[in-house]
Image (cartoon, rainbow, N blue to C red):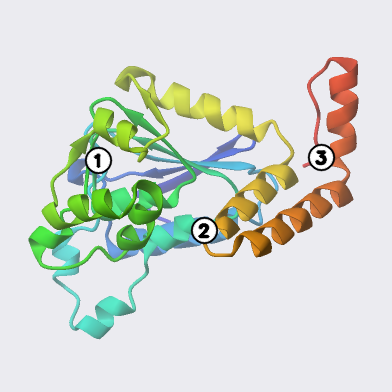
Amino acid sequence: MTEEVTFTVANFVGEIMLNRPQKHNAMTPKMAAELQAICAAVDADDAVSVVLVKGAGERAFSSGSDLNSLAEYPSAWAFRNRVIYESAIRNIKKPVIAALKGWVLGGGAEMAMAADIRVAGRSMKLGFPEVTRGWVGGGGASQMLPRIIGYGQAMRLLLTGEPIDGEEAYRLGLVEFLVDDANLESEARALCAKIAGYSPVASQSVKAAVRMALSSTLEAGLRYENEMNTLCFSAGDHLEGINAFREGRSAEFKR
């Protein structure tokens, strides 16, 4: 691994950092492959209960794909078979929190949409400028945005390519928390620590059940939710949760 994508673990929180601040953390194919490898390993790592994704420096979370790298694809077919780094984040089974600051553009915005919860600094500028460059965002914007903010607002952002600020992103529901820039990392880490303190089986089951709601009927989703609860009860963490509540202490769940 190079140092352009780093991964550290502390207190059951795994931190992925896009570390190319001199280029606004723009993604190259090599970085995409490294990110994919990290994300694939996260689910098998018992030391990780929650994942935090962030960008290095103060200017950007990520400006998306490096345009020079995009120009190097020899054909449309080669581009089609690229590593889709946004999907690497979306496929993580554990809860993923994104800490967003500065520029969050194109593939960077799609990585943010792939997270489960987004914490944004007030100076954040989020946008999908792909249409102004002559293509469609390839990391899921056309599919995720309508699910999050509705058809009309999704079309506005995707067809104009114009960025929005943190306040508007919060108003639209694109980010769940809006904080002062100076507090962004501490707030995001506090949220990760809170979730990491819960049962890993329960938190992953919550994510799986809610994700199912995006692609299933209500009846199928309810059946799946019941399956997830059965899994949680089979793991036995509910007994620790009940006993901790009765005894007035913090639960200590199995890892």
Q: Is residue 171 left or right of residue 156?
A: right
Crowding around mark 2 (Cα neighbors within 10 Å: few <14, some 14 to 19, many 20+) is few
Q: Quadrant for residue 100, please give it.
A: top left
Give coordinates of residue 91: x percent, y percent.
52, 60
Q: Is residue 82 left or right of residue 75?
A: right
Read off the residue under disc 1. Answer: 21
Q: Is residue 172 left or right of residue 118?
A: left
- Quick check: 28 above or below 98? below
Q: Is residue 47 visible?
A: yes
- Quick check: 84 above or below 52? below
Counting the numbered discs, the total is 3
Q: Are marks 1 and 3 in contact (CB under 8 Å)?
A: no
The residues tagged by marks 3 and 2 sit, at their Cα atoms, a distance apart of 29 Å
Read off the residue under disc 2. Answer: 214
Read off the residue under disc 3. Answer: 254
- Quarter of the image for the C terminus: give it: top right
- Tell me, for residue 54, which label it has, or none: none
